[in-house]
């Protein structure tokens, strides 16, 4: 029972109109799970499976920005990696433009992966230090056997221009660029094959304060100019509120609340979301100090609590919270605000 | 301002020898901290905030040295003290916590004994007494089940717990001044809130002065009484936290605050974030005049020749900015 799929509600509407291609989500996960084996002992026997992502259903329409937020270990990065096919899923389906990725032939799959690209958190680790920027940007074309010779060079020059770099940067090495410039290269590489969806995994968090807004404005411009959809994975809630249309809050591998960004930030309903928003340092100084913060640590995924995984820290937890897993269900009249809490 | 500050840094210059020449990481920094007060040093990587903190502690790496200036602690310039006396201050009257509690703790020693070492070094408690004191400290920093935790190793603890252990260790000898270098940067936001709350509580209890180094102006807003904003090794603005964050005077502070979305701001409402153009200049490059000139929207000829002095920008308090053309200037 605890593992039942999230209830209908918001999704019934989508499902009814599924026949009309325009309203098919560009990217959709349906009960998606990712498990990692845990090995112990000298024989490295598999002793357990760690559920990093557990039955997550989210969707993104054309030109939309979906924010995925949560603290370390909540599964947000693994979910992002599953969306671009970097990790195997153990259950559920991933659909791109309505097509189940698992059901495709390798060739079709390769086609599809062009449509969903990724930008990584650390621009120092995600660029090959032994390749010049030009070679780094050639890789996507080589892998997919696209645009050779002069056409490729034209395309690469367009890309660097698009992300605000100069043609002379093409002959530089990654170590010669600043963090902000490297992240621009990472973005250019993701855009090389004209994707429809870009998964951005903490793209700003390795950058200095004064550089973050430069890159954030670039992401906004590119999205508007190219009509891109973003999956924006972040722990920085101020930026998520600023950028995203819809937000999914994750805790220990599950989505505990999802809503349009405005609704989520104005009236968070899940106790965890409330605690998370309360914990964000407020940039407007207050003479009054905030009250007591949430207690305790995030439990280990290997010893995930029974029932609601948040009950060990929840100020409102009751007996039923320890006994059964709450389902994600619609909690408002628009059908767009969902939360997984027994008390709502 | 208190007439008798706990810590007074006066014209501090700290330089590093590098293969490409000597660079001044801290270039004439002055600030003071009163008893029971929290002063945040805020700025981006390379601005000299951590080097200022390490200069106070006397924990600079071998390639670095204090060139000039004074660091007075309770009126005594610690730079003139013999090494042994200075060592006696560290871990006793002066203590420090670091950004990475994972690397600052000894991985092969149980945490209880690591904390007890602080008493052994300073001879402030005997063996049996030390254990009781450590347990009391673990309770004080709100570590649940301290008897069990006493014998645990760092890898068995979460990041937040390890930072609490660091805080317990720093507070063991009831320091007068605690230097905290980005102590919550590596932590999740709910854990960060716990640690900030704990520091405020302990400060109220013990009256410790705190120097809190951070890159995050929202954290400054939460914890600081006063804030010192640094850029390129120099102080560009300082004052009470409300004054600086609500009425910033230096274009850099103004730029940093405008580059972050405020609660409720969304791009759909037409808000576009301000941008500070360019990047921080390399400290190896000699720049005449103001170090912020290449990125400043207000730059004029004078900024390229004359280093701006830190001058008061508001009457009646200690709000000052190092800018020829500050906002709300008195000139």
Image: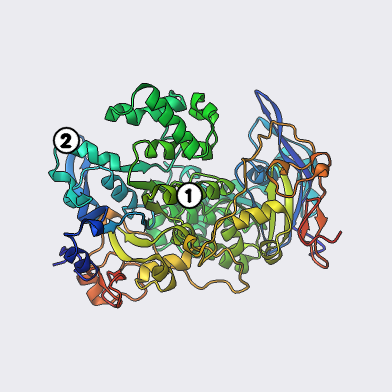
B211 on left or right of B27 = left
Q: Is residue A7 left or right of residue B185?
A: left
On what subunit does the disc labeled 1 rest?
A: A
Residue B24 picture location, percent across and down: 72, 35
Residue A35 numbered tag: none
In terms of image quadrants, where is residue A325? bottom left
Residue B266: x %, y % from top left? 49, 63
Residue at 67%, 65% (x, y): give it: B246
Disc 2: which residue: A106
User: Measured from the top left, where is residue A36 in percent x and y?
Assistant: 22, 45
Residue A253 visible in the shown view: no
- Horizontal arrangement in the rendering, residue A305 relative to residue A3 (left or right): right
Could you tell me which quadrant the C terminus of chain A lies in?
bottom left
Residue nearer the viewer, A28 or A162: A162
- Which image quarter holds the N terminus of chain A? bottom left
Q: Secondary structure at mark 1?
A: helix
Q: Nearer the viewer, mark 1 or mark 2?
A: 1
Which residue position is annotated with label 1? A221
* Disc 1 with disc 2 on a shared chain: yes
Label 1: how many Cα within 10 Å (few below 14, some 14–19, many 20+): some
A209 lies above or below A194: below
């Amino acid at each position: 029972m605890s593992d039942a799929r999230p209830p209908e509600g918001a999704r019934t509407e989508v499902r009814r109109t599924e026949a009309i291609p325009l309203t098919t989500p560009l990217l959709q996960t349906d009960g998606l799970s990712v498990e990692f084996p845990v090995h112990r002992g000298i024989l490295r026997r598999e002793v357990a499976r760690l559920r990093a992502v557990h039955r997550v259903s989210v969707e993104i329409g054309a030109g939309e920005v979906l924010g995925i937020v949560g603290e370390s270990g909540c599964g947000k990065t693994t979910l992002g990696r599953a969306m671009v096919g970097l990790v195997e899923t153990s259950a559920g389906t991933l659909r791109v433009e309505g097509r189940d990725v698992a059901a495709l032939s390798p060739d079709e799959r390769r086609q599809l992966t062009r449509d969903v690209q990724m930008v990584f958190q650390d621009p120092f680790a995600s660029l090959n230090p032994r390749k010049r920027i030009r070679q780094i940007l050639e890789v996507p074309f080589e892998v997919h056997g696209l645009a050779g010779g002069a056409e490729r060079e034209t395309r690469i020059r367009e890309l660097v221009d698009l992300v605000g770099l100069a043609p002379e940067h093409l002959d530089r090495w990654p170590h010669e660029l600043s963090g902000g410039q490297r992240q621009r290269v990472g973005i250019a590489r993701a855009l090389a094959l004209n994707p429809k969806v870009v998964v951005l995994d903490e793209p700003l968090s390795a950058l200095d304060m004064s550089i973050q807004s430069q890159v954030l404005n670039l992401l906004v411009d590119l999205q508007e100019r190219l009509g891109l959809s973003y999956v924006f994975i972040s722990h920085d809630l101020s930026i998520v509120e600023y950028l995203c249309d819809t937000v999914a809050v994750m805790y220990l591998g599950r989505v505990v609340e999802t809503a349009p960004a405005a609704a989520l930030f104005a009236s968070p309903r899940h106790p965890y979301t409330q605690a998370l928003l309360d914990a964000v340092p407020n940039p407007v100084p207050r003479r009054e100090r905030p009250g007591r913060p949430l207690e305790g640590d995030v439990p280990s995924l290997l010893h995930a609590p029974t029932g609601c995984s948040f009950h060990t820290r929840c100020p409102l937890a009751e007996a039923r919270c320890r006994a059964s897993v709450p389902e994600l269900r619609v909690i408002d009249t628009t059908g767009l605000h969902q939360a997984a809490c027994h008390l709502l | 301002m208190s007439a008798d500050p706990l810590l007074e840094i006066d014209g501090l210059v700290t330089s590093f020898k590098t293969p490409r020449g000597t660079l001044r990481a801290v270039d004439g920094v002055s600030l003071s901290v009163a008893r029971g007060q929290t002063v945040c040093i805020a700025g981006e990587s390379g601005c000299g905030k951590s080097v200022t903190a390490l200069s106070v502690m006397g924990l600079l790496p071998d390639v670095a040295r204090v060139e000039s200036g004074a660091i007075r602690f309770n009126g005594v310039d610690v730079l003139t003290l013999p090494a042994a006396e200075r060592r006696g201050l560290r871990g006793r009257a002066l203590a420090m916590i670091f950004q990475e509690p994972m690397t600052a703790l000894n991985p092969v020693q149980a945490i209880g004994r690591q904390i007890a070492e602080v008493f052994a070094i300073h001879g402030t408690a005997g063996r049996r007494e030390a254990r009781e004191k450590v347990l009391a400290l673990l309770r004080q920093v709100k570590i649940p089940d301290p008897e069990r935790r006493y014998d645990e190793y760092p890898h068995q603890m979460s990041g937040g717990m390890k930072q609490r252990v660091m805080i317990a260790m720093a507070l063991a000898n009831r320091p007068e001044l605690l230097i905290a270098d980005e102590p919550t940067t590596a932590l999740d936001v709910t854990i960060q809130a716990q640690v900030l709350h704990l520091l405020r509580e302990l400060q109220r209890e013990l009256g410790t002065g705190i120097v809190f180094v951070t890159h995050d102006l929202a954290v400054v807003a939460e914890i600081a009484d006063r804030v010192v904003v640094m850029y390129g090794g120099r102080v560009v603005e300082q004052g009470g936290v409300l004054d600086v964050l609500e009425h910033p005077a230096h274009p850099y502070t103004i730029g940093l605050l405008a580059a972050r979305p405020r609660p409720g701001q969304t791009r759909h409402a037409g808000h576009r974030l301000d941008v500070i153009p360019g990047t921080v200049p390399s400290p190896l490059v000699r720049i005449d005049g103001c170090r912020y000139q290449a990125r400043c929207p207000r730059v004029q000829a004078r900024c390229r020749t004359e280093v701006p002095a830190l001058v008061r920008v508001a009457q009646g308090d200690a709000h000052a900015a190092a800018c020829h053309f500050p906002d709300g200037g008195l000139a």
